[in-house]
Image: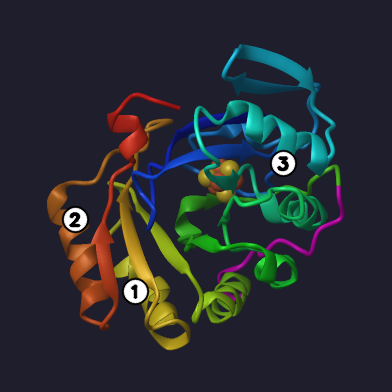
Amino acid sequence: MLEVFASIQGEGRYVGEPQVFVRLRGCPLRCRWCDTPGSWSAQGREVRIDSRRGTRREPSLSTPFQVACWVAECEPGPPRTVSLTGGEPLAHPGFVLGLASFLGPRRLHLETAGAHPRALEKVLERVAHVSLDLKLPADLDAPVELESEPAEPVPRTRAEWAEVRAECLALVAERDACAKVIVAGNRAPEEFDELFESTAEHAPKLPVCIQPVTPVSGIPAPSIELVTHVAERARGLGLDVRIVPQVHRLLAIP
Ligand code: SF4
């Protein structure tokens, strides 16, 4: 566990909704534009809790019940939707299931990189919404194995990514879900075709949120022309497309 805090959903289908965010530690992927590299390691001593009474730190190793209590502490008003993010929450499917059982009236949303279809299948019935990243292999450095829970193997090749992407899309196709595609300025429009073709085949009704990258680590922001070209390639396949920048960055909130 890395942090629990209240904020506004800045991405995807529920952009703008006040939520509580539960950020788990541990991610085997290495997206070149990752804006939360502090969440990569599954090891860590402390969790930051931004409660109504102020910020404090607790031991990182925490139970789902404990985290559900922290969620209630962080809510400034009536119960909010809880967004489970990372890191990669599906590196810890047992924790996801445990937390779901302690959240009371709150909806649980899952943000995932889409690399673990078996774990997604396991938790799917217990989450109200899935925000599924569609990763461009060219945007990824080599993955690493996590030190903690044994998870299913992480895709490494373009063919392995195509396989897990198709599986994840099929799993969320008829559910409350969306796909998220990050567009960096160093990509060409046609590079995204493999993501959109797979979506059109396996989840044609899934809303696709195209998100201009927030520049980090020397990765350039895309031009509006590039973003528009990418969006039109998706629309050309009949997909339901929205262009959504990271709203929480615009508002300068966590
Ligand atoms: S999947 Fe998420 S946390 Fe992991 S490297 Fe990519 S952006 Fe960062």
The magenta segment is 149-159
Q: Upstream in the sequence, badge 1 or badge 2? A: 1
Q: In which quadrant of this rendering is ligand 1 seen?
A: top right
Residue 154 is marked as: none
| Closer mark to the observer between disc 3 and disc 1 | 3
Going by the numbered disc 1, the residue's amino acid type is: Asp
Magenta-drawn stretch contains 157: yes
Q: Which residue is mark 1?
A: 193
Name the image quarter holding the C terminus. top left
Identity of the residue furthest to the front in this view: 78
Report which quarter residue 179 is drawn in: bottom left
Q: Upstream in the sequence, badge 3 or badge 2? A: 3
Q: Are marks 1 and 2 in contact (CB under 8 Å)?
A: no
The foreground one among 134 and 98 is 98
Q: Which residue is mark 3?
A: 26
State the residue at coordinates (45%, 81%): 203
Q: Secondary structure at mark 1?
A: helix
Q: Which residue is mark 2?
A: 226
Going by the numbered disc 2, the residue's amino acid type is: Leu
Q: Secondary structure at mark 3?
A: loop
Using the rendered image of the protein, determine whether residue 74 is visible from the camera's viewpoint.
yes
Q: Give percent across and percent down for residue 51.
A: 60, 21
Q: Please give left or right for residue 68 compared with residue 182 in the image.
A: right
State the residue at coordinates (55%, 31%): 75
Q: Are marks 3 and 1 in contact (CB under 8 Å)?
A: no
Name the image quarter holding the N terminus. top right
